[in-house]
Image (cartoon, rainbow, N blue to C red):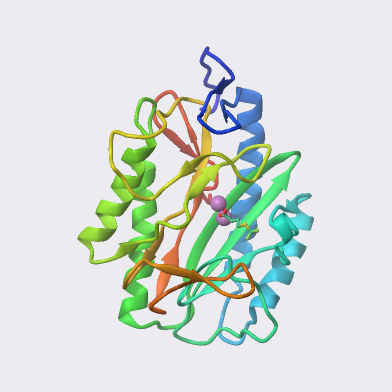
Amino acid sequence: MHNWYWTGPAAVPTLGPMAIVIHDPRELEAMRQAGRVAAQTLAAVTARVRPGVSTAQIDAWVREDTAARGARPSQLGYQGFPAAVCVSRNHVVCHGIPSPTEVLADGDIVNVDVTSELEGFHGDTSVTVAVGVVPPQAQHVLEVARDALEAGIAAVRPGARLGDVGAAIEDFARARGCGTVRDFGGHGIGRRMHMPPHVSHHGPPGQGVRLRPGMTFTIEPMITVGNPAVLVLADGWTAVTADRSPTAQFEHTVAVTPTGCEVLTRPR
Ligand code: MF3
Ligand code: CO
Ligand code: CO
C-alpha cells in the first residue's frame, strides 16, 4: 500500500530562502512513524479530558505519553514556547500555554495540539474536544472546523495548488456561516516542525504552490463563529479572537501521493 515511487528533483525552489522538500520513500516511511506517534499521543491524552482537568495536567500527560513512545515533544522550547503542547480553550485560537490554574469545565471546547519528533522527523496533529455538553455555537464551530479540514484534505492531489486547498476550506466554512482565520496557517513539515510552504486556509483557487508527490505539510484550519480577526496576548503566544467568540481547530499532517493524499496522522 505504502510503496510508491516517482522520479524527479528532491526539492522545488521557492521564492524564500528555503526550498520545499520532496521526501523520498524512506523519508516518507519515517514521517509515517512520526505521524502515527503524534496521533497516538493525541488520542491517549484527549481520551482523559474531562471537567476538572487543568491544562497543565494535559501538558504533563503529553510529556509522559510522548516519552513512552520514544519521541520528543517538538513544541517544547520551540522559539521559547514554554510547554510540550498547545492547549487552546473557547476563544483561544491557537498557541494556548498550559497552566495549572486553567481548569476545564462542562461546556468548554478545547484544542489539544500535539507535535512529536521521532528519529529526526516530525508529526503534527490536533483536535478540538467538547467537554461535557457545550453550547450550540461551540458545537457548530467544532463540527465546521473538523469537516473543513476534511474538505481541505480532499483537495490535495498532484497538480492541484495550495490555493485550491485553502479555497475548499474557506468556502466550506463560509457556507456554514463561519469565519476562517487568516493570521495563521499550516506549514511544510519533515525534518523540521515548520518548513516551507506556508499553507493558508483561504483561496484564491488556482494559485500558489503546485502540489507534487513527496511534499508533506499540515492543514490546520482555525474556524470562528464570529469575526476571524485575532489578537495575541501579552505573553507573546496566546492568540484569541478579537471579539472573544468561540473558535475551533483541527490539524493533520499529510503527504502528497501520486494519486492524491495520504493522511499521516489519521488515528487507526
Ligand atoms: N503545533 C503547532 C502548529 O500546528 C506549533 C505551534 S508553535 C509552538 O504549528 F511553539 F507554539 F508550539
Ligand atoms: Co502545525
Ligand atoms: Co500543531
User: Residue 3 at what x, y percent from top left?
Assistant: 55, 23
User: Residue 161 at what x, y percent from top left?
Assistant: 36, 33
Residue at 62 percent of width and 46 percent of height? 123
User: Residue 37 at what x, y percent from top left?
Assistant: 66, 49
Q: Is residue 253 left or right of residue 78?
A: left
- Do we see residue 18 in this rendering? yes
Q: Nearer the viewer, residue 182 or 255?
A: 182
Residue at 31 percent of width and 39 percent of height? 164
| Quarter of the displayed picture in which ligand 1 can be seen | bottom right
Q: Is residue 139 left or right of residue 250?
A: left
Q: Single out the residue that lies furthest toward the top.
A: 7
Residue at 38 percent of width and 34 percent of height? 208
Residue 165 sits above or below residue 158 on the image:
below
Residue 230 sits above or below residue 26 on the image:
below
Q: Single out the residue that lies furthest toward the left.
A: 175
Q: Nearer the viewer, residue 81 or 68?
A: 81
Res. 43 image quadrant: bottom right
The count of marks equals 0
Res. 199 image quadrant: top left
User: Residue 219 at what x, y percent from top left?
Assistant: 46, 48
- Do we see residue 253 in this rendering? no
Residue at 56 percent of width and 80 percent of height? 50
